């Protein structure tokens, strides 16, 4: 029996590619945080008046101020 001839006259083009993960940036950031933790610091806050005190620049509702 005769063997079938293989047609190899045309070269095949091979392309390799990859699709970047949408989570890649987050994964890299998480890896850096594990290696070198981020120093977190609370933001300064303004001091608030106690709730029973009414600031002087706002009229009191009992003295005929704003109403709903």
Image (cartoon, grey):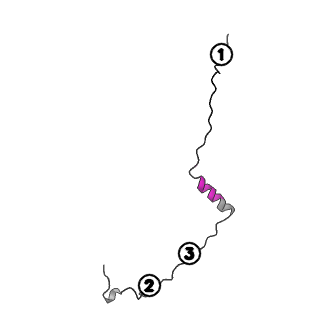
Provide residue 23's location: percent of width, then percent of height.
Answer: 57, 53
Quick check: is 27 in the magenta stretch?
yes
Tell me the distance, in whole angstroms, between the alpha carbons under discs 2 and 3.
22 Å
Q: Residue at x 63, y 56 (%)?
A: 28
Along the polypeptide, which appears first: circle 1 or circle 3? Answer: 1
**Local crowd size for mark 3, using a 10 Å CA cut-off: few (<14), some (14–19), many (≥20):** few
Residue marked by disc 3: 43
Q: Nearer the viewer, residue 9 or 2?
A: 9
From the viewer's perspective, is residue 40 above or below residue 22?
A: below
Residue stretch rendered in magenta on the structure: 17-31
Residue 63 to residue 20: above or below: below
Residue ID at (60%, 73%): 41
Q: Give SS at disc 2.
A: loop
Categorize mark 1 by other alpha carbons within 10 Å: few (<14), some (14-19), many (20+): few
Taking depth in this image into account, of 28 and 10 the one nearest to the observer is 10
Which residue in the structure is indicated by mark 1?
Answer: 5
Residue 56: percent from the left, percent from the top? 41, 89
- The residue identified by callout 2 is 51
Among numbered discs 2 and 1, the one appearing first in the sequence: 1
Label 2 – label 1 distance at C-alpha:
93 Å
Q: Position of residue 29 (x, y in %)?
A: 62, 59
> If the image is split into quadrants, where does the N terminus sit?
top right
Residue 29 painted magenta:
yes
27 w.r.t. 18: above or below? below
Dot 1: what SS?
loop
Q: Secondary structure at mark 3?
A: loop
Within 10 Å of the Cα at label 2, are there few (<14), some (14-19), or many (20+) other Cα atoms? few
Residue 9: x and y in percent read 64, 21
Q: Quadrant of the C terminus?
A: bottom left
Q: Mark 2 or mark 3: which is in front?
A: 3
Left or right of 20? Residue 35 is: right
Tally the marks: 3
């Amino acid at each position: 029996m005769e063997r079938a001839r293989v047609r190899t006259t045309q070269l095949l083009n091979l392309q390799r590619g990859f699709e970047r993960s949408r989570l890649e940036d987050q994964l890299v950031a998480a890896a850096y945080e594990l290696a070198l933790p981020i120093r977190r610091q609370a933001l300064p806050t303004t001091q608030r008046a106690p709730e029973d005190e009414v600031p002087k620049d706002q009229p009191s509702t009992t003295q005929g101020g704003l109403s709903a």
